């Protein structure tokens, strides 16, 4: 099987590429700014979504069986101050890809895994959140992802394209950039241990509860959905349980040998924050047999260890 990953150089793209290689796939990676020596076994191509013709050329050259469309703006926090960029990067680039596939000779041969988010659900969904729940996104990022899903499934309905839309809940793991809660906390703990900053962590609302899944389990679900999922369907990818941000921080603090003070900073509170949020993975498990295999404590330790190693480079 031959896979093309857009956004291959990103946090999730790297893990997906490795998962596919480990499972015998020929892996191609598309990115605007990918380093020349990215990952052994991954063949790189330049993908520029501002030119539909160049995207079609890449598709015709690579001839993938599946496109995992990972590229885009991935931060809720960033989306509030960069709404136009968020929609350009997420929605318009997705439309460019779908149009290129539709107009290529490969329209009936490629399965597209469209990457959405649990942020599409927003307020009002009954817990645990199922795929048929009401969608009422409360931030620009979630709205952009909901729009992607609707457009993608419209292409399936109108043009017969083989498309699956996934809604991944919070995913975490070593290598995730700053701006996400587990990486932010872990790096602060390591900086304190190294004596680089005062032994104090300033936090927002710790009472919020979220559904976290390790990125290595997430990409396994992506692959299984390509292999076993049903076209035209939406699938949640989640652990099915939630944990408070306070407990996340507590686990990370337990890895440190130094006492660390925690101070609540109301300036760090998110607007329109939902207190409790977790999904149902029943549909995914039924279709693919997928189960999360990495515990939250193991994920957090791996993230902490990643920042420990990075601080010594």
Image (cartoon, helix red, strand yellow):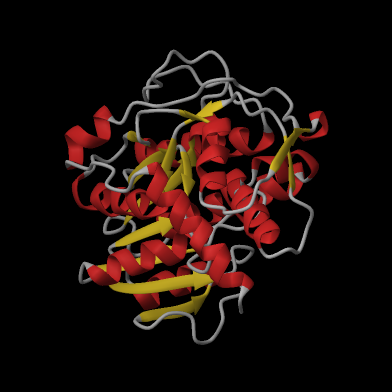
Where does the image place residue 142, in percent across and percent down from the top left? Answer: 59, 34
What is the count of numbered marks?
A: 0
Residue that appears at 77% across and 46% down: 82
Q: Which quadrant is home to the N terminus?
A: bottom left
> From what the image shows, is residue 152 above or below residue 125?
below
Using the rendered view, name the quadrant where residue 268 is placed.
top right
Where does the image place residue 162, in percent across and percent down from the top left? Answer: 30, 47
> From what the image shows, is residue 108 above or below residue 271?
below
Where does the image place residue 152, in percent across and percent down from the top left? Answer: 45, 42
Residue that appears at 20% across and 52% down: 227
Where does the image place residue 50, in percent across and percent down from the top left? Answer: 64, 63
> From what the image shows, is residue 304 above or below residue 295?
below
In the displayed structure image, the side of residue 202 where residue 65 appears, left or right: left
The one of 2 and 51 positioned closer to us in this rendering: 2
Q: Which quadrant is home to the C terminus?
A: bottom right
Residue that appears at 37% across and 59% down: 67
The one of 204 and 31 positioned closer to us in this rendering: 204
């Amino acid at each position: 099987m031959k896979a093309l990953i857009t956004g291959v150089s990103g946090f999730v793209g790297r893990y997906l590429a490795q998962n596919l290689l480990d499972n015998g796939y020929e892996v191609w990676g598309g990115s605007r700014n990918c380093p020349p020596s990215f990952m052994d076994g991954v063949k790189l191509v330049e993908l520029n979504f501002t030119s539909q013709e160049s995207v079609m050329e890449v598709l015709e050259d690579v001839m993938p069986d599946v496109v995992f469309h990972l590229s885009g703006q991935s931060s809720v926090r960033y989306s509030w101050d960069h709404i136009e960029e968020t929609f350009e990067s997420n929605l318009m680039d997705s439309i460019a890809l779908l149009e290129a596939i539709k107009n290529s000779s490969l329209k009936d041969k490629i399965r597209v895994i469209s990457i959405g988010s649990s942020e599409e659900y927003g307020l009002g969904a009954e817990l645990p959140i199922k795929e048929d729940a009401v969608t009422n996104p409360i931030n620009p990022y979630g709205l952009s992802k909901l729009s992607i899903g609707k457009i993608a499934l419209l292409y399936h309905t109108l043009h017969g394209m083989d498309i699956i839309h996934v809604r991944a809940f919070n995913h975490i793991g070593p290598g995730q950039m700053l701006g996400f809660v587990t990486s932010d906390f872990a790096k602060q703990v390591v900086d304190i241990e190294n004596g680089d900053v005062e032994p104090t962590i300033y936090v927002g609302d710790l009472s919020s509860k979220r559904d976290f899944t390790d990125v290595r389990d997430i990409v396994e679900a992506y692959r299984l959905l390509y292999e076993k999922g049903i076209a035209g369907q939406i699938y949640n990818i989640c652990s099915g349980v939630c944990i408070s941000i306070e407990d996340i921080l507590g686990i990370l603090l337990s890895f440190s040998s130094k006492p660390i003070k925690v101070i609540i900073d109301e300036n760090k509170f998110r607007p329109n924050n939902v207190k409790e949020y977790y999904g149902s993975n029943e549909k995914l498990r039924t279709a693919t047999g997928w189960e999360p295999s990495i515990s939250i404590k193991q994920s957090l330790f791996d993230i902490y260890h990643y920042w420990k190693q990075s601080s010594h480079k």
